[in-house]
Amino acid sequence: MISSLFWIVPVSSVLALIFAWIFYKSMMTREEGNDRMKEIAQYVREGAMAYLKRQYTVVAKVFAVLVILLLVLAYMGIQNPFVPVAFLTGGFFSGLCGYLGMKTATNASARTAWAASSSLNKALQVALRSGAVMGLVVVGFGLLDIALWFLILNFAVFTPDNMQNGLQFLGLTFVYPGTSEHQKMIEITATMLTFGMGASTQALFARVGGGIFTKAADVGADLVGKVEAGIPEDDPRNPATIADNVGDNVGDVAGMGADLYESYAGSILSTAALGAALPALTAQGQVKAIIAPMIVSAIGILLSIAGIYMVRAKESATQRNLLRALLLGTGGSSVLILVAMAIMAAAGWITWGVFGSVVSGLVAGVIIGQATEYFTSDEYKPTRGIAQQAQQGPATVIIEGISVGMFSTWVPVITIVLGIIAAFGFAGGFTDFSQGVYGIGFAAVGMLSTLSITLATDAFGPIADNAGGNAEMSHLPKEVRERTDALDALGNTTAATGKGFAIGSAALTALSLLAAYIEEVKMWIGRLADSAPEGFKQIGDILFYKSHVPAVVQQGQRAVDIAHAGVSDFVAAYNLSIFNPLLLGGAFIGSMMAFVFCSLSMKAVGRAASKMVDEVRRQFREIPGIMEGTGKPEYTTCVEISTRGAQREMVVPALLAIIVPVVIGIFFGVPGVVGLLAGGMTAGFTLACMLNNAGGAWDNAKKFIEKGNFGGKKSEPHKAAVVGDTVGDPFKDTSGPSLNILIKLMSMVSVVMTGLTVAFKIF
């Protein structure tokens, strides 16, 4: 029986979508500015929509092939038959969030610039609430999809009759006969978990493709425009300017929306799956453990909406004042979610131990975010140190930026380690392992519970950046550009902070998915044991049985009831030890995947950027009057170059993340997959932190010089800083943010393909 409190989940998700609509309509009533501003905004909208259409065409073809493969596996009996449908719904909603966010952002940039003509606060409000549209559609559609899946499976599929007699359709078994209430909830959450694979797949294509697009344009615009031609950023004479503005939307908005949709959904679904598998729970307790993360996320939506209205700024606000204004909204929402969870603990919906786990996760997220701010904001020593090195030339800028990025990893790594241990311990993990990993999953849910306002503070950055570009190209007064630059610099810091927060939650989610993978292994072993003629499935020296105790057990063997099997049983059966060469080999391959993936995405940016540089140089050389402002650049040609480059280059890195877990599962089995996920998670987390922080620091070091320090714009230190920023662009906007999707996608693919791994392996 589902508690009446569950209905807050679909209600909150619908409310999020309503407020997203309200914020969108409010933004659209704002004046877009003069004719020149409208013209530039239209260029950006058309380019962004054209790119997204082509991206979705490529992704649709990939999805079609994958759905066919999943259907084949389902008919072979080694795949959950719901997976193909769940895969499509996850991908659809992930893509939809990206589309709606980008549509909002491309309409908001000119309106933000025009609002900046009046005041800084008005511009902040337009940009932030437009960014909030992205945050609210992500959490709204994510939670609504989860709620609908849960209701359909609980009331329409796993009915008492189907549980007793089974449910078959078109030769596929959807419900096995004799399913108990406890097993029902495990099956439901395991099924729901699979839709995360579709979301993760779409997100990776969006992040990689969008990242390649935006950085190819950005590199071309900066290297030729700023360094060679000596013209300002976003100057209308630069042919790559429109492509750069388009890229901000397809990469930092559409890609980011798809990315965080799967993070949000993945954390909730993995925690629900772990809650369903908790031993020694009553039927009512099991249901509470499943829907508790959904309820916390629903409450987080309501509090995030309140937090959005808290953000205000004075006209004379400094960078620190702006950061504090945003912190009031995000921090206030986080404090209120803790209050709400304390009430849930007092009411018995969660334990006080789980509450402690959530506190651990939130504290870890805050520390990682603040550390990211320290290492990337030009208010502090690391970024100013990079700017100072610009006086020596681009080489020292690059060296200093890489060293800052590398050094910065110690804070998030130590923090996430302590956060994991604390979350595990508070939930009772040192006495009950299952409770501990449930606490870790809940820590990720707590970190992402106020995602709508966190994402709003992240998404407004690209909007402010585009607003600055529009102001520059429309020749608005100097004070307008100063206001948009202030918001842009703030956006760089909040984006870096948001990326730190996202990668922290990704590590926690990936760890909970690893635990969910073991539960999925358990479920598939039970199915294989039940269908085997001998009535059991032998793994190593352990005979796992479901219904019938093995008649003969050889010396050195153990018979274990799969329903009561614990993690230690699977550790022993599969020899999940660091000394197992299959597990160690998987760990090395997982670590390698992080570096190979980054290499492929960076090389893709380099190849696309080289074509962009050649094109911009050609136009400067061949179009008469372009430098005098009398000739019109061919903007569409540059947009097309970025589009073609992104479409061509995004496929291989994305498919690699899907193929490798399957291959490792077939060749190395469960130990190899566990090693792969552990290696990918640890190396990917550390590398992502380094890339995000180095890129953010380079960007803000350049902006620090542009404020008039060390010679200001057009000086030699400024040119050196631009080179550093150019190197950092694929770090922070392509490879870095894609890594958190990589580690979760490999986990999701492993979970979805568990049946194949358990049934077939070579070694």
Image (cartoon, grey):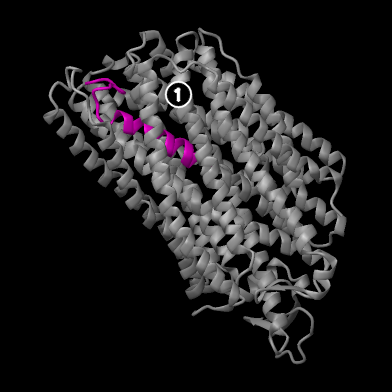
Occupied quadrant, residue 523: bottom right
**Residue at horizontal 77%, vertical 60%?**
156
- The answer to whether residue 249 is visible is yes
Q: Is residue 265 magenta?
A: no
> Which residue is nearer to you in this view: 711 or 522?
522
Of 648 and 321, nearer the camera is 648
The quarter in which the N terminus is drawn is: bottom right
- From the viewer's side, name the closer residue of 114 and 382: 114
Q: Residue 327 appears at what percent x and percent y?
A: 60, 24
Left or right of 8? Residue 346 is right
Q: Helix, strand, or loop for circle 1?
A: helix
Q: Is residue 407 visible?
A: no
Q: Is residue 419 above or below residue 542?
A: above
Q: Is 404 on the left-hand or right-hand side of 368? A: left
Identify the magenta region: 231-257
Q: Which residue is mark 1?
A: 109
Inspect the magenta stretch and tell me whether residue 241 lies in it: yes
Residue at 34% across, 32% down = 244
Residue type at tag 1: Ser
Question: With 279 as the anchor, is 682 left or right in this view?
Answer: left
